[in-house]
DNA sequence: TGGTGTGAACCGATTCACAGCA
DNA sequence: TGCTGTGAATCGGTTCACACCA
């Protein structure tokens, strides 16, 4: 008889949309006292007003009938939902071209992400600096991050090293991994792993351009 | 009465899986004469066997009952589906740290993507080379790519320039854009645009780590 | 026996439509 | 009147289960 208690949490894709709303709010010139409608957020992020309202519902109904959402309240809610009251420490593993570019990527600082350490296994890179980040030996991962609060790692290593690096990260207590290596790795239950595979993004275009409608 | 003709094409997420299968096949040591089961592909890519079979159905039933899929046939089908018989030309706009790293990214050559030109608007960069790619003035986009076959552009420009760059690309006949700028742009119907936003990937982790279950 | 192909069932996410409130 | 909040309807994708074939 029970229909199964219908979804009781924001869907995965909703997290992405919340981040988009949040980014939009930080970019507009409106005052924090102003109100914004679900329609405006929808237009700005390419979704529907109903979708926006539903997304915003999960963290408490903070809209006001007839007026919209007070920007201050929205920002507060989003900051809390993403835990952005504080800066997040992030480590990088793999200091190749891509890794170096990621260290320099300005978007991170802006978003309260702070790359605090970098690791590589290439003896030629260990001990050097990229921007102001010291590159350490990957074997020192454990000891280096032991007393720092780090939950997130960005990995940009060759595909053959990936699983090994991931294992090491997990063993060190890392809880979320953003992977740029063009291959997959397995992680234990409870560890988040997101893959960004540049070639596969382009492959998607190829498929579509090939006329597979 | 009609239930609406149910899905008659591979879902968007299926394109991603197809690319994954394809990559797995190029990486294994099996002979092209060998057979592979949906189960093996599923295990290798983190999906289910039924899912794999359904995905492979869209481009023709090439499995053989009791044996699996002949690797040669699979590869041929995938090559055709992604139009990988030929090399694809790609241009890059925005030669900052990230742009330079993308030019050097080895995954592209391997996957038959060929970056043939780079553009920037910074006078200090125009005329220089990154690897063996000449950086041209973005204003020469049209004339430079007029006689080349280019359908795909990778964009790694500052957020404020994005929409303008996108407009220019679309006007030049580009049909697919991979965007690394941390913002959105609008494109006309029929143009494909995929956003890769590094901060937002990390934000997703933050949300999950915050215990929003 | 082993493994494909596929309709049907299921399930989660999106959209619709409207009641309710300022 | 304008816009939110939300159940209900819908949609699309995934999984199930099994007929079928070598």
Image (cartoon, coloured by chain):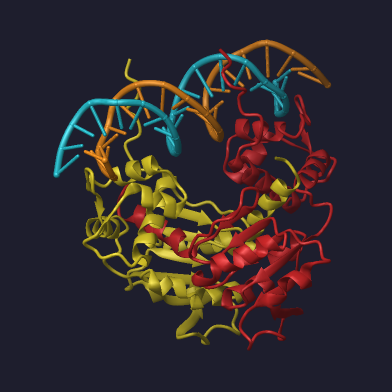
Chain colours: A red, B yellow, C orange, D cyan
Residue drawn at (67%, 34%) of the image: A38
The one of A130 and D5 positioned closer to us in this rendering: A130
Residue B19 in view: yes
Give percent across and percent down for residue A93. 64, 71
Rendered position, A128 above or below B87: below
Left of B81 or right of it: where is A90?
right
Residue drawn at (46%, 63%) of the image: B169
Give percent across and percent down for residue A67. 77, 29
Residue A131 in view: no
Res. C6 image quadrant: top left
The one of B78 and A25 positioned closer to us in this rendering: B78
Give the total number of marks visible in the rendering: 0
- State which quarter of the image contains the N terminus of chain B: top left
Give percent across and percent down for residue B139. 50, 73
The one of B162 and B168 positioned closer to us in this rendering: B162
- State which quarter of the image contains the C terminus of chain B: top right
Give percent across and percent down for residue B138. 51, 74
Left of A47 or right of it: where is B65?
left
Residue drawn at (79%, 41%) of the image: A77
Res. A170 image quadrant: bottom right
Residue drawn at (30%, 56%) of the image: B78
Res. A86 image quadrant: bottom right
């Amino acid at each position: 008889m029970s229909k199964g208690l219908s979804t009781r949490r924001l869907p995965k894709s909703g997290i992405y949309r919340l981040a988009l709303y949040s980014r939009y709010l930080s970019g507009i010139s409106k005052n924090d006292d102003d109100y914004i409608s679900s329609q405006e957020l929808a237009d700005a992020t390419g979704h529907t007003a109903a979708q926006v309202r539903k997304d915003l519902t999960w963290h408490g109904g903070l809209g006001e009938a007839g007026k919209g959402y007070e920007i201050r309240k929205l920002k507060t809610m989003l900051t809390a939902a993403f835990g952005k009251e504080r800066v997040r420490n992030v480590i990088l593993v793999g200091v190749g071209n891509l890794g170096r570019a990621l260290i320099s990527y300005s978007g991170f600082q802006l978003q309260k992400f702070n790359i605090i350490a970098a690791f590589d296994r290439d003896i030629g890179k260990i001990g050097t600096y990229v921007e102001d980040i010291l590159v350490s030996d990957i074997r020192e991962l454990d000891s280096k991050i032991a007393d720092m609060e780090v939950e997130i790692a960005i990995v940009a290593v060759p595909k053959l090293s990936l699983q090994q690096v991931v294992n090491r990260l997990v063993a060190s207590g890392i809880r979320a991994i953003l992977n740029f290596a063009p291959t997959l790795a397995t992680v234990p239950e409870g560890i988040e792993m997101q893959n960004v595979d540049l070639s596969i993004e382009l492959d998607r275009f190829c498929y579509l351009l090939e006329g597979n409608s």
